[in-house]
Image: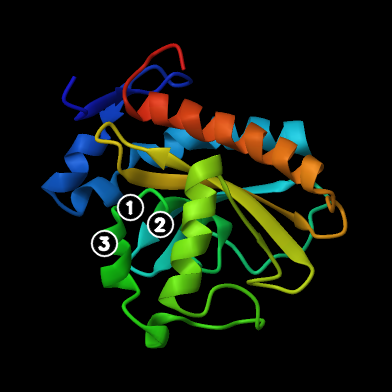
Amino acid sequence: AEGFVVHLPEARPYGLGVGAFELGSAYLRNDPLERLARPLLTRLVAQTGQTVHLGVLHGRETLYLLKEQPRRAVPLITDVGVRLPAHLTASGRSMLAALPRAQVRALYPNRDAFVDRTGAGPTNPTELRELLAQERARGWAEEDGHVSAGIASVAACVLDYGQRPAAAVGCTFASSAIAADGERAALARVVRAVADRLARRLAGTRNS
């Protein structure tokens, strides 16, 4: 009930829950988040045929914890352990959108806080605030060419038991492969459903 333990459906034992995160970095060294997420990501790859990730927010960066991909995957810069500017990644922005606005302002107080990779994406606090408002309203984030030209992503935030961003599930693909807005929105809804399911697992719901 307090979020300190969670059930691991595939393996059946119990592991540390999100509530233990507040006790220190030991949570990250023995993190059930990856074990809870991996089977969901594996199924998401099979369902979409695209590369999927699990990322967490680390300051102004997205840190990728898991990467699952189909046999013939588009080459990507993202990999386990890679850090990318959160304001440029769909995963990062989905988590930023779930933070209190004051916390986002503290992370991005001025233009100097913004890193540019391809010339695309928000470059100042106002642009980021407006983009996060849109993504917060629809429940998922999208980037196209903000990290790598010709590569796009959609992502949804995984909320912990306190309704704070614990992680994000993202799906990355060639921009030309899924170009229509409707197709991307449909993919994002699938990713959103997986993120919500992972949130229920983190909360300890056994039938998630």
Residue closer to the observer: 147 or 96: 96
Contact (CB < 8 A) between labels 1 and 3?
Answer: yes
What residue sits right under mark 2 in the picture?
96
**Where in the figure is residue 160, as x and y percent of width and height?**
32, 36
Q: How many marks?
A: 3
Mark 3: amino acid = Gln
Q: Residue furthest top?
A: 207
Contact (CB < 8 A) between labels 3 and 2?
Answer: no
Q: Which residue appears at 35% of the width and 74% of the height?
A: 108
How far is the residue under mark 1 from the one under mark 3? Answer: 6 Å
What residue sits right under mark 1 in the picture?
99
Contact (CB < 8 A) between labels 1 and 2?
Answer: yes
Mark 2: amino acid = Leu
Going from N to C along the chain, the mark reached first, 3 or 2, is 2
**Where in the figure is residue 191, as x and y percent of width and height?**
61, 37
Task: Give the colouring mode of the picture.
Answer: rainbow
Residue 8, compared with residue 123, is above or below; it is above
State whether residue 68 appears in this view: no
As drawn, is 99 to the left or to the right of 41? left
How far is the residue under mark 3 from the one under mark 2? Answer: 9 Å
How far is the residue under mark 1 from the one under mark 2? Answer: 5 Å
Tag 2 secondary structure: helix
Residue 103: assigned label = 3
**Where in the figure is residue 199, as x and y percent of width and height?**
41, 31
How dense is the environment of label 2, judged by Cα within 10 Å: few (below 14), some, or many (20 and up)? many
As drawn, is 69 to the left or to the right of 72? left
Q: To which quarter of the image does residue 17 belong? A: top left
